[in-house]
Amino acid sequence: MTWIRTAARLLLGAFLVTAGIAHLVVPGEFLAQVPPFLPAPGAIVLVSGLVEIALGAAVLLAPARQRPAVGIAAAALFVLVFPGNVSQYLTGTAAFGLDTDAARATRLLLQPLLVVWALWSCGSWPLLRGARGSGRHRARN
């Protein structure tokens, strides 16, 4: 199981770095995911690409003791970009080959899997459980 988790983590890191680079190379595709009410869509695409590259590098290179925190950060990124995916669905904007409502809806359903992938492959579940448990303990005191 360890090698499967390692392979999943390395694949996630490569995916994030590749997606981040794509933000810089073909930013127009990513503009489709920036909700219309947000300012400076070009800057949002640029910054989100740089964040993806940094997180991908961290997923690939972080020491084992830091990986759970990195996994939480990657999962948080996937949660933060979800409104952009919803916006793309609601506006019917085609990008990345998502040119039908069914394709865009399927993309929405895959987003939670990215969150789980980040948390599992980086070994973040125990850290999340520990944080949740310590919060309950403090609340009782």
Image (spheres, rainbow, N blue to C red):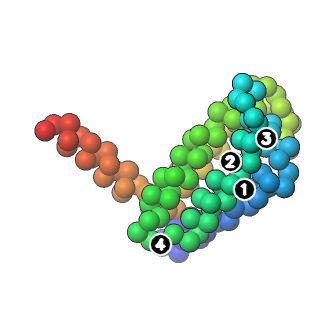
- The image quarter in which residue 16 lies: bottom right
Q: Which residue matches tag 4?
A: 63
Location of residue 4 with respect to 73 vertically, above or below: below
Q: Nearer the viewer, mark 3 or mark 1?
A: 3
Q: Residue most toward the left?
A: 141
Location of residue 68 with respect to 89 vertically, above or below: below
Image location (x, y in percent) of residue 100: 84, 33
Q: Residues within 10 Å of mark 1 (few under 14, many from 20)?
A: many
Image location (x, y in percent) of residue 51: 64, 53
Q: Which residue matches tag 3?
A: 42
Pointer 1 with pointer 2, Cβ within 8 A = yes
Task: Specify whether 10 is left or right of 106.
Answer: left
Q: Residues within 10 Å of mark 3 (few under 14, many from 20)?
A: some
Task: Specify whether 53 is left or right of 3.
Answer: right
Instruction: Give the mark, 4 or 3, whose residue is nearer the N terminus.
Output: 3
Query: What's the CA distance linking mark 2 and mark 4?
Result: 24 Å
Task: Indicate which disc residue 20 carries.
Answer: 1
- The image quarter in which residue 33 lies: top right
Residue type marked 3: Gly
Point 68% across, 65% down: residue: 14
Please, what secondary structure does the residue beneath circle 2 have? helix
Pointer 2 with pointer 4, Cβ within 8 A = no
Please, what secondary structure does the residue beneath circle 1 have? helix
Instruction: Give the mark, 3 or 2, whose residue is nearer the N terminus.
Output: 3
Instruction: Give the mark, 1 or 4, whose residue is nearer the N terminus.
Output: 1
Point 30% across, 52% down: residue: 130
Please, what secondary structure does the residue beneath circle 4 have? loop
Q: Nearer the viewer, mark 2 or mark 4?
A: 2
Pointer 1 with pointer 4, Cβ within 8 A = no
Pointer 4 with pointer 3, Cβ within 8 A = no
Residue type marked 1: Gly
